[in-house]
């Protein structure tokens, strides 16, 4: 069971990792090109001669990574809150099947593993951004945005988990009700 | 020689799980590690602090033994140059 969960988490972690790496590289190259910032690409990494340029590029490339993470999390949270197979409305299900978008309907295991991975990435980026802002290597408002986004995403995911638990509870009560009726009928028959 | 297959199976599972955990951590730490890709060219800072990029002391063209700084009388003469 642990192996299955771990394999699932690794499977979900590959795409965002590649996406974030590409975002970092592309954003650094694009920002230096657009703003005409000089840098030298060495085997050790991108070397900047000016402190201001370094802070500028570091901040905005981090912001690009946060934006990618936010987009992914919004997509996952929308799926969790509106298209979750445990609490999706029948009308919406019909509409999705009609428009051939049934792949949007996902199970709790898929949604929560995706959500957990993307949230971990956001928390890790926030932690690194906080450390960098303490040493003035990044603008201080970058970690603020990151932490706010991480907090809001966590809150929304918790709301979905609560919905899920309510669904399980109501399902449990619905299952209990017929047995109670049967028992009452049996008692009536005996009497 | 007989092996306890259940015990071997259990050890194998623990090994596989720990390897999977390491792999997961490596994947999670990968984007955060890109922060070390951007670096500052510190060779200019070293010059300011009196060290050249090769680690040798920077040579001052001024005679620093005097209170009022004046250019050394003969900069070609290495004996006049005071090293910090």
Image (cartoon, coloured by chain):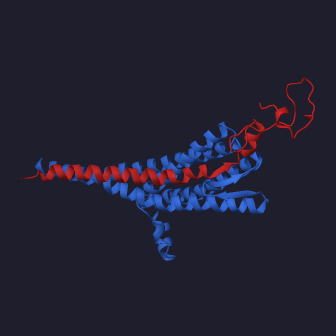
Chain colours: A blue, B red
* Residue A170 visible in image: no
Determine the image quadrant of residue B59: top right
The quarter of the picture where residue A19 lies is bottom right
- Looking at the image, is A56 positioned above or below residue B73? below
Q: Which of A64 and A56 is in front in this view?
A: A56
Front residue (pair B28, A113): B28
How far from the left and from the top, in percent, is residue B23? 41, 54
Left of A134 or right of it: where is A99? left
Q: Which residue is drawn at 57% across and 57% down?
A: A74
Comparing A13 with A105, the one in front is A13
- Quarter containing the C terminus of chain B: top right
Q: Would you place residue A156 above or below residue A97 in this image?
A: above
Residue A168: x %, y % from top left: 36, 51
Q: Which residue is drawn at 52% across and 58% down?
A: A17
Left or right placement of residue A134 versus residue A109 in this view: right
Q: Estimate the x, y position of residue A169 in percent, counting from the top left.
A: 36, 48
Q: Looking at the image, which is closer to me, A88 or A127?
A: A127
Q: Number of marks in the image?
A: 0
Kindly give the residue lying farthest to the top in the view shown: B67
Q: Where is residue A118 in the image (x, y as percent from the top left)?
A: 51, 54
Q: Residue at x 55, y 60 (%)?
A: A75
Q: Is residue A113 above or below residue B59?
A: below
Q: Can residue B8 be seen in this view?
A: yes
């Amino acid at each position: 069971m642990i192996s299955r969960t771990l394999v699932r988490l690794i499977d979900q972690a590959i795409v965002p990792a590649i996406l974030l790496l590409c975002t970092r590289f592309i954003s650094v190259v694009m920002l230096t090109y657009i703003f005409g910032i000089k840098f030298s690409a060495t085997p050790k990494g991108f070397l900047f001669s000016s402190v201001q340029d370094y802070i500028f590029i570091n901040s905005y490339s981090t912001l690009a990574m946060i934006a990618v993470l936010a987009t992914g999390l919004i997509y996952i949270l929308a799926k969790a809150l509106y298209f979750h197979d445990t609490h999706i409305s029948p009308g919406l299900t019909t509409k999705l099947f009609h428009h051939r978008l049934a792949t949007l309907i996902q199970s709790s295991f898929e949604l929560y593993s995706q959500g957990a991975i993307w949230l971990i990435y956001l928390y890790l980026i926030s932690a690194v951004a906080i450390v960098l802002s303490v040493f003035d290597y990044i603008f201080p408002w970058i970690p603020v945005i990151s932490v706010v986004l991480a907090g809001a995403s966590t809150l929304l995911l918790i709301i979905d988990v609560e919905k899920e638990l309510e669904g399980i509870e109501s399902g449990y009560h619905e299952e209990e009700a017929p047995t109670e009726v049967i028992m009452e009928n049996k008692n009536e028959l005996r009497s | 020689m007989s092996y306890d297959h259940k015990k071997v199976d259990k050890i194998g599972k623990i090994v596989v799980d720990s390897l999977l955990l390491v792999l997961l951590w490596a994947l999670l730490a990968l984007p955060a590690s890109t922060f070390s890709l951007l670096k500052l060219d510190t060779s200019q800072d070293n010059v300011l602090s009196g060290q050249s990029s090769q680690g040798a002391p920077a040579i001052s063209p001024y005679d620093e033994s005097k209170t009022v700084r004046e250019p050394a009388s003969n900069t070609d003469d290495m004996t006049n140059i005071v090293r910090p």
